[in-house]
Amino acid sequence: METPNQFIHSATIAIKDIGLQTALGRGTTNAVNNRIKGMGELPDAYDLRQQARGARLRALHRLPELLEQLEQNLIARGVTVLWAQDAAECNQHVLDIARQHAVHKIVKGKSMATEETKLNDFLIAQGIDIIESDLGEFIVQIDGDHPSHIVMPIMHKTKEDVRDLFVEHLGIAPTDNPQELTAAARVHLRQKFIEADMGITGANFAIAETGHLVTVTNEGNGRMTASLPRVHVIVMGIEKVIETVQDFAALVQLLTRSATGQRLTSYVHMFGGAARPDDPDGPDHQYVILLDNGRSKIHGTQYAESLACIRCGACLNTCPVYQNVGGHAYGWVYPGPIGAIITPLLTGIHNASPLPHASSLCGSCKSACPVDIDIPDMLLKLRGDLVEEGDTPFLITAGIKGWEVSMRSPALYELSGRAASLGTNLIKGKDGQLHNLPSMLGNWTQYRDFPPFAKKSFRQQWRERKTR
């Protein structure tokens, strides 16, 4: 995986990758169309979005209180609750649990939080076998790759890529049939579920009112990961907590329609503790790790609204930048418009300085967001932060300073206009347009023409008219 500061270099390579462009074209087009169709079925879509937005912002406003309420209700259900300030503490908690229960094999459901902490790499280094059970995550794992999308980890791969991987790693006969490819993965993973000592999942929501953790999936792997092994560990970011079951009812409708276009996913699981005498199903032990990893620092800032994200991926699918460069170019766990906000906030703005600029500010992300997060506004604020921190290229800083000076002086303003007119008219093409501006200005003419400045400015023409 590249780093966020390599975005421009990575994006340039991605744009020229024909295979990637094919996969992105298929994936994002289907995702956008499915979301539009799914949301279009709701006669009160706008009102539901505002209700969901209110639920998330209300939960963030009461975050400390709700986390304590969640902890109390989880403990009452027999769940062991652990807190993790950062990635290292989270990973150590998981390792300690594994050692306490003599765990050697782990199956894992989809979890963006554990992608943050690089849990898989950590456990493998400790000699513990861990395998992803989500189909997309399983595919990137056997390929030694990383997810490129919040919801669809293999947005960057075509079915032909998956076929070749399965032929190599699962030993199947070549086939492009998605059902046959899925069946091959199912056969391989079923034995892994049976052998596993521990299951690890994330959580889409945590309901403080009742102490339930919720996951929504389409493959059933989440349920098997949580119930078949004797130990179940849930790793969730602290921002996932919501107040009530009623809030969940509103949010889950928008999550599924925004993510996949479905009215509801195939499986919605509400985990409420380990097996009990009166409810013998499920694991013998259940743990919940509440991960901060920088979230509490965001909570007290002007960017707190970014924590309302429900990880549906709709802003990625509709973003013209993501549609052309994919997720890996962003260099960290969270790509796309919301990733361009979260990554600088969680990893440090100087470690991801190109990302706030990786947007046309078209507003499509805000229109698609099921909880109406004002993503363009926060991207602009982050750009302002970069300027205040002095994290801008020297030529741009010098150019803006020069522009400021010329705007304050009528004489310099007129002189610069004359210079621009002379220069652009000297290098214009036969069609009267500029095709190759010099230096960084060439980034414009690489994709579009630039009209030359007028040979005579308005001021010059005005003076000439007055002397007639």
Image (spheres, grey):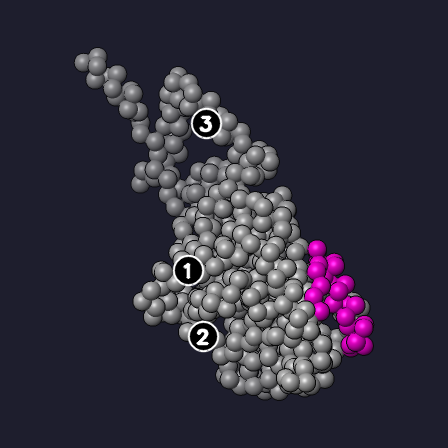
> Can you tell which mark lies on residue 199?
none
| Vertical placement of residue 415 versus 351, above or below | above
The answer to which of marks 3 and 2 sits earlier in the sequence is 2
Tell me: residue 24, above or below residue 139: above
Res 458 → quadrant: top left
Question: Mark 2 touching mark 1, by CB under 8 A?
Answer: no
Residue, x 49% and y 25% (percent of image)?
402
The magenta span reads: 80-104
Q: Residue at x 60, y 36 (%)?
A: 389
- Of the numbered discs 3 and 1, the one sitting upstream in the chain is 1
How many dots with numbers? 3
Distance CA(mark 3)–CA(mark 2) = 54 Å
> Residue 388: which quarter of the image?
top right
Check disc 3 and report the residue beneath it: 403
Q: Which residue is mark 2?
A: 264
- Is the N terminus in the top left, top right, bottom left or bottom right quadrant? bottom right
Give the distance between the C-alpha atoms of the residues marked 2 and 1, in whole angstroms.
Answer: 18 Å
Q: Which structural element holds mark 2?
A: loop
Q: Position of residue 115 (x, y in %)?
A: 64, 63
Depth-wise, is mark 3 or mark 2 nearer the camera? 2
Residue 112 position, x and y percent, is 61, 64
Q: Residue 400: image x %, image y %?
A: 49, 30
* Residue 293 image point, x, y percent: 66, 55
In this view, the residue farthest toward the left is 468
311 falls in the magenta region: no
Point 40% across, 67% down: residue: 35
How crowded pointer 3 is (Cα within 10 Å; few <14, some 14-19, many 20+) is rated as some
Under mark 1, the amino acid is Gln
SS at mark 1 in the image: helix
Residue named by callout 1: 51
